[in-house]
Structure formats: C-alpha cells, structure tokens
Image (spheres, coloured by chain):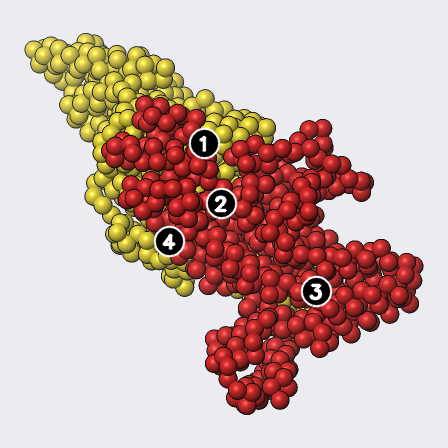
Amino acid sequence: MTSLAEADAPFRPVADAVLAVAAVASELGRDDLAGRLRIAVARLTRPTTIVCVVGEFKQGKSSLVNAIVGESICPVDDDLATSALTLLRYGDERRVEVRRTVGQESLVESSSVEDLGDWVSEAGNPGNAKGVERVDVAVPNSLLAKGIAFVDTPGMGSLGAGHAAATLAFLPFADALVFVSDASAELSAPELEFLQRARELCPTVLFALTKTDLHASWRRVADLNAGHLSHADVELVPLPVSSQLRTLAVARSDETLNRSSGFPALYGELSGRVLRPAKQLAARRAVDEAQAGATQLETTLRSELSALTDPEAAAQTASQAAAVAARLEHLRGPGARWSVLVGDRVVDLTNDVTFVFRGRMRQITRDLETEIENLKTGKDWDELARSLQTQVAEAVTTAFTAIAAGAQSTREDVVDLLAEETLVLNAVEQTGLPFDVQSLWSGHSLDPQGSKAGRALGTTLSGLRGAQSGIIMFGMMARFLPAGVGALLMTNPVTLGLGVAFGGMQIRDAQSRKVAQRRQQARAHVRQFVDDVQFEVGNAMSEALRAVQRSIRDEFTDRVGELQRTYADASRQATEAATRGADDAARRTAEVTASLDAIAAARAPLAAALAGASA
Amino acid sequence: MSTALEQALDLCDRAVSLAPSRATEIGVVRQRAQGPLRVALAGRVKAGKSTLLNALVGERLAATDAGECTRIVTWFQDGSGYDVQALLSDGSRVAIPFRRVDGALQLQLDGLDADQVTRLEVTWPSARLRSITLIDTPGLASLDDRNSLRTREFLAMGEDRPADADAVIYLMRHLHRADAEFLGAFLDRSVSASSPVNAVAVLARADEIGACRLDAMTSAARIASRYQADPVLRSLCTHVTAMAGLLAETGLTLREDEANALRTLAQTPSAELDAMLLSVDAFCEPASSELTVEMRRALLERLGLYGLRLVVQELVAARAGTATELSRVLLAASGLDALRALIDGHFLPRAQTLKARSALAALRDVARSLAADDPAGARALDAEIERVEAAIPDFAELRTTHLVLSGAVILSAAETAEVELACTPGATDSTRLGIDEGSTAEVRRQAALLAVGRWRTRASDPLNDSATNEVCETMARTFEGIYAAAV
C-alpha cells in the first residue's frame, strides 16, 4: 500500500497551489470561482477511475478484489461463481444499492454487504434470475479513497451466467482492466482470444496470475503465459499474486507475508498505470482552471487599477467592460450561436445513432433468419442464441460509444465557436485589459493535445476515459445495457426462451412439419428479442442524448456566466474608481495592488507544481 | 438368448460372407469387439488427464508437467511384454525407445514429428489394463490448435464415422461451457443412437478447487453432487465424482525415501511448520527446514500443497507413520476408490453392450463405404445390421436409460428410478424389479406383470410424444422379458 501513498506526493504541491488561488478568489468575493477550483482539487485527490476485473469464472476475481481493498466484501465460494456486476467504490458510509429490473420495472433497493451474496452470487441469484443490473457498493475504505472503483464481473465460460459480450460492452468505459487467470494452468485459447479483444477496447491491461500460494509451478506457468502473450503480440507481463497470503498479511499486519503475496507490485501497477495518468490529467485540468480563474480575478482588478490611476480613461474602461459584459450576456442566452449549435448537433447525433442502430438490428434479424433455415440441431440453436447476444451487445456498445463520442465532438466545436466569439470581444477591448480568452476554454477540451483530426474512435475513447464522468458513463452503460438488454445478455441463452423452441431436439429425427413449425417459432423469438432490445435501448438512448444536451448547455452557460460577472464587476469597479476621493483612491490603489500581488504569488507556483506532477 | 456382444460377433462373421471385399475391415471390427473396453480420458488443457491415468494404472506411465504436455493421443494397453510403438499417419509403425526414471516412464520421441504420428501405443503388463485400455488425449481448448484437433479427430468429432473410444472419462475443474459443449459433441458423434451412459465426469484436481484447505475434498464432493443434479450435465453424463489425481498417483507410488522426508518434515516445530505450509514459496524457503530445497520441491510436485498439509496433519497426530500408512491416507483422500467403483459398476457392466454397439456402428460404416462399389451387398449388410440391432433388447434399454437420464423424456421421479433399476445391466431380476433379493418366482412374476400393465397404460396416454412412447414400450417389453424368465 506504500506505493499508493507515495503516488500522491507529486500531486500535493499542485493541490496546494490551486487551493491557494481558490483562497484568494474567496477573499475577493468570487466564491463561484473558488468553488470550481475546490471541486477540481477534490477530483485530483480522488479521481474516479474504474478498474474492471475480468476473466474466466472461478479464477479468483472476487478474492482478488477483496484482497486489493483489504476487506471481505465480494462473496467468495469454492463452488458458486459471481453472477452479476458489482461496482465497489468509496463512500463515507457503507451503503449497498441493488439495481434490477423486474418485469418492465426498474427497481433500486437497499441492501447490506452481508447480504451481497443474495444478489451477485450463483448461490443467491442463480443465472442472475433476479435480473440484477448492477450492485453499487460504497464503503469507507482507505484504498478506494485513493480514487479507484472496482468492478467485479461474472466470469466468462460458466454455464449459468456470464457472457463475454456483456463484459466486453463495459470495457470502453473502464480506465483499466485486470485480467485474472490462476496459476494452475497456462492460458487457454478462449482466454487469450478474450484478452486480445478486450485490449482493443481498453488499452490499459494488467494480468494478475492468481493463487500462487497453491501451485508449486506458478513460475513455470508465468513463463509459459509470458511466452504465449509475446507470441500473440500482447505486451503484458503476468503479475503473480496470492489473495490468500495478502488477506493473511492484512490480518496479521505481516510485512514479509505482504511482500510474498505479490500485492505491492500490483499496487505499483495500479498506481503507476491507472491512478497516475488520471491524476496527471486532473492536475493539468486543475492548474488550467486555476490559471483561468486567476486571469479573471486579475481582469477585474486591473481594470479597476487603470481607472484609479487614470481617472480620464475610467469612463472608457467602464463602458468597454460593460460592452463585453453585454455581449457575454447575449452569449448566455438561448439565442447564442453555440446554443443553437448544441441543439442542432444533438438532433443530428440522435438521427445518426438511431439510424445506424436500427440498421444494425435489422441486419442482425435478417442474418439470423437465414441461419435459422440452416439449423441442424438444438445445439446449433444455442450457438445461434449466443451469437445473437454477442451481436446485439456489440450494436448497443457501438451506439453508446457513438453518443459519447458525439457529445465530445459537440463540446469541442462549442469551444471553437466560443473562441471565435471571444476573439471579437478581444477586438472590442483595447485598453490593455490583459485577457487571454482562449485559455478559458482550452483547459476544458477533454484531450488538450487532441486535434479534431484525432477523432478516431480510439482517441475518443481515451478521451472519454479521462473524463470526469467516467463513473457516470459507466453507470449509464450499466443501466443502459441491462435495463433492456444486459439482463438478457448476461443470461444463459436457454433461458432466453430461444432454446425452448429447439431444446434437445434432433432436427433430422423430427418430422419436417414440426421442424418448419419450430423454425417459425424460432424466427418469432428472434424478432421478439430484437424488438424488446430496440424498445428498451431506444428509450435509454433518447434519455442519454437529452442528458448530453443538458450537460453541455449547463456547463457553458455557467462558464459564460462567470465571465460575464467578471466583466460586469470590472465595469462597476471602474465606474466607482472614478468617483473616489484622492485619499480613498490611494488606499484602494494599495489594496488592489496588494490583491494583484497576492494573485501573482498564488499563481507563481502553479507551473512548477504541474511540471513536478507531470514528470 | 445370446448376449448382445455374441450377436454382434456373430453378425461380423455373417458380414464377411455378405461383403467379402471388406473382410480385413470387418476382421478389425471383430477383434476390437473382443478386446478390452476402450476408455478415453478427455478434458481441457491441464485438467489432469495424464495424472489420473497414472492413478488408474497405479504406475507413472503418462508424462505430466506444469505446462501443456500431452501432445499425441497415447494408448495404454495390457500385453505380455513392455513395448512402445508409434503408429504413423502412413500406417507404418516405429518402435520408440523408453526408460524409467524414478519410477516414471520416459519416452524418447526425439526426431519424431507430432504431426506425423497418429498415436502412440504403450503396451505394459498390468492387471489394471486387462479389462480396459486407457487412452490419454491432448487437452481441448489448447493454445496450440493442432493439439486440440488431434483429440477431436480421435474422438471422431465433426466427422461422420464412429469413434475409436467406447467410453469417455471427462475431466474438468469447474463446469465450463466448453466442457458441456465437448461432452455434447462426443455423445452426438460416438453413438449412433446417442447416449450419456458411456460418459462419466470427474471433477479433477479437486484438492485445488477448495484452495488446498484441509476440508477441500469435502467441499469438492459437495460440488460434484451439485453438478450431478445439474440438468445440463445430467443430460451429458450420469455420474460426477470428485478426485484428486495427484494424491492417488502418489499414494500408489510413494517411495520410502519420500516417506522419510515427510517424517522429518513433520518434526519441524509447529510454528515453523505452519508458516511453511502457508504457501508453496514459503515451503521452499531454505532456512525453514533441514530438508534440502530440492527434496522439498520434489515433495511439492508429488503431493501438492493439500497433500502436504494432509500428510503432515496425520503424521503430527501420529495417525500414520510408515510409507504404507501414508499411502493409505493419500488414497483414501484422493477419491480414487469412488472412480474405480464407477468404472467397475458403470462402464464394465455395460462394456459388453457398449462394445457390441461400437461394433454395429463400425459395421454400418463398412456398409456405407461398400455402397459405392457394391450397392446390393451394402443394402443386404445394412438390413442385417438393422435386424440384429432391433433384436437386441440391451440397445433399446440403453437408449431408454439415455432418453430418461438426459431429460429428453421427462418422467416422474418414481418412474425415472424404475427405469434406472430395470435397465441396470448384469443385475438380477429381483433388483431390476426393485423387490427383495431372493423373492420367489411367483412374487417376481406378479411384480413384473403389474409393471407391464403400468407401462402399457402409460404408453397409451394420447398426450405422449414419440420418445415417451418409445420409453414406455421398451419398459413394458423389458418387464415382459422378466415375466417370461420367471415362468
């Protein structure tokens, strides 16, 4: 755990520097700016990164999660596997919320850590019959407080539940995934296949080789796995760990045992490859916010100062600032170009996404109907049902990533548009009000280095991953999938009602009339399934799109509001300055100069701190 | 009435006169029907197939390793002398040099291209191999596709020909979807009328499933019984048993020097000992015991962490001391007895029927190949096979057992139990009727008569589908046979 604490060190100066700017902002009565900076610092202290723990069933995923956080939370059993998703994150008090769908209804129920097994394990919830979409567990745990949330997934390959497609659907929204395979045997073909597929969706991958306490030849297995991985061009080194030893080490506070558990290395990777990049991004953002905030504070003060020192120009300064404020007031309103742009973009996005999704679903239905004609046995039917699940899951994931990518691109266009608008503003004011408008927005572009050209899906996803809304995205995905589809995707195809039509029958044995009848039934099942998915996903999509529009609008309205206030203040203070008596003006000049010095002092360490954190 | 196997052999003789051009093939079919039952050990990579094979034979014949290690299908059969041969894909045979190191058989396969070898045949004088020939297969779901392909080819999956194995012991660690698919495919292919009665599933490496805790085997047994009740698995095989192959293998081959080392180990102070048994790495920590690290590594390899914990517990409690006593402890914990009982009670009684059915399937294959150059002969042979198949009640009973146990035909619990009893090969009529042993002929007759009536009534239910009708009819005929025998 030490390495995680050390990982915080380089970011502390950044947090302190940003808080110093926030303090100055508070003092100057700009609590709106101060509040924003404090939120940025909170995100830096605890970024919400999501780590998905994936792998085949019974490899020790739940044990690993428990051992990482040092508490027994996820149910562990020799026999029964995990059957539903668990999202484990930090909370001030223990809280368990079960989200599930019963019939057409979505329920959120309270539960407790002790009763978790009733929802997420094959014992209490075989084949996820209870329709659990996700269980949210919040615990006041020191490791989770660092800003990692873990997702314990149902393993792949079990008969009861757990389907690779459903797991894969979540990966685009994870910051990292921990692939789990135990030391009893080298990687199998399906495992490697999954790993390759998963890596395309989430490039940060850790490989935990579990149960090293039990298997004498774990070193051999680790070598063999490393060989298989390099042969498959997967650059990944197995991290040997023993959850059992780690748990014992925690119970006994035994440092030697902890070292032999292999967990320090795992923490090192989590800290270096998951937390650090997230924190660096958060640090960059916090510093950008602080710089922009400081600039705004300075704008007001400088305009006042110039009015104080040159009462002649005061009227002009005041009127110019007022003009800018008025222009900004217009920018806030619904008639502003950017606001219209957001509306248009969301409509376009809705059309695009819906069109592509419907087309894909239609294609899936057609393909399956052709395949149904060629079915030979009941087993082919299971295969078909599974492929239906996979294809639908992919279509849903694509739709959702398209929405997320569209939201990001809309956001970037709004930034560009606002930059143009504010260039006009820059031209308006020439009195030397120091104002770099561009800097206000650049910090909010999700990927500062990213150009529009770099909007391939890959970069978009990495941008998404860095977004603060990681958890929200993930949550949406979790709700989005299971509400309509996820529960279906995660269940055994036989229970889909699809298997019933052909269950156990040998088509060649049966009479042709019966076969035709069953094919008819099967087609009806597929259409019903696709219809259900379309209905549910359609609803969730419009909801997601509305949320996108709302969030972009709110964000930029707030921003412009802040800016508008800055200029309104500048105008008012310039006017006031002109009416002050000489003594009063001298006193005020000293105050303003002192404030400007304070801002400069608070601002000075920002760059160095950021450089230290980025090193 | 002659047995199914006798009728099948008889059919082989007649087949030669019907299809003289295929005399050699038919000769092979006949020879095989007379030979021991062929049982294949199959499963995913590293399920512990070779270890289990060694345990069943009681000698370390199949090579085992931490990595994937069985790459060629290997037959282990009884014989008068020690001999290892490779059967190449061009049909020729090559003798393979071999030696034994520390009791383990080592084959020198240098210069042999695995792709050229159809199979290896290890002939080894062993009482255990007299009634069954064991076949070790490469793991399924291997990263090396060719290895898995060899097993699939051998078990004749995906090809339209009968399998070389009469029965399969399927090893798995947890029931993976791939396991279910494999078992399903094997059933479809291997048996003309399909049946799970020739498959037994083994929860292998059971000691590791329970994290090598001392109660691991109890836990594994519980899992096995849950699987046995699982409808999916139930339709694929009738029995699931938990087994720690390594313990059985070592229990049967434990050497005195190993026992000595274990005794030394047990004398380590208990705090030290507890720390050593925490993990495999702690066990090999140089300072913690006077045993050499090499020795400890060897012990770990032979016993696993669970085996060590178990043996140490028994030694410390002074419940065992000598190599013989330790062997007994290991064997008792391993679950080998239960598996052997399954083979003896499940495969062997059906062996005759299974072999007869395999022979019929093989003859049908001959008829199919004959159709091209001698259509008339092929038709005659087919008709003859059909006639014999219909005349042998065992086949119908086997199929009935399958239909019921696999869940294709759903009966009440009482009816299912009745079917299982009545279709037990080799059982006495009283057992099959479910009445007291030694009941008089009169009692048996009455019971059989009642049963016939019951199944006939059941068969006349207009809501039955054809499979249910088939089961009811077969049952009625079976009880008629018992009735006739008691008159």
Which of the two discs, 2 and 4, sits closer to the camera? 2
Q: Could you tell me which secondary element the residue under label 2 belongs to?
A: helix
Estimate the spatial distance between the alpha carbons at disc 1 and disc 3, rounded to whole Å: 45 Å
Instruction: Provide the chain ID for the residue under circle 1.
Output: B
The x and y percentages for residue A201 are 50, 36
Residue B301 seen in the current view: yes
- Chain represented in yellow: A
Which of the two discs, 1 and 3, sits closer to the camera? 1
The residue singled out by tag 3 in the image is B357
The residue singled out by tag 4 in the image is B218
Q: Amino acid at mark 1?
A: Ala
Q: Residue at x 51, y 27 (%)?
A: A223
Mark closest to the chain's N terminus, 1 or 2: 2
Instruction: Provide the chain ID for the residue under circle 3.
Output: B
Q: Residue at x 36, y 15 (%)?
A: A615
Q: Amino acid at mark 2?
A: Leu
Please, is residue A546 above or below residue A240 in the view? Answer: below
The residue singled out by tag 1 in the image is B298
The x and y percentages for residue B173 are 48, 48
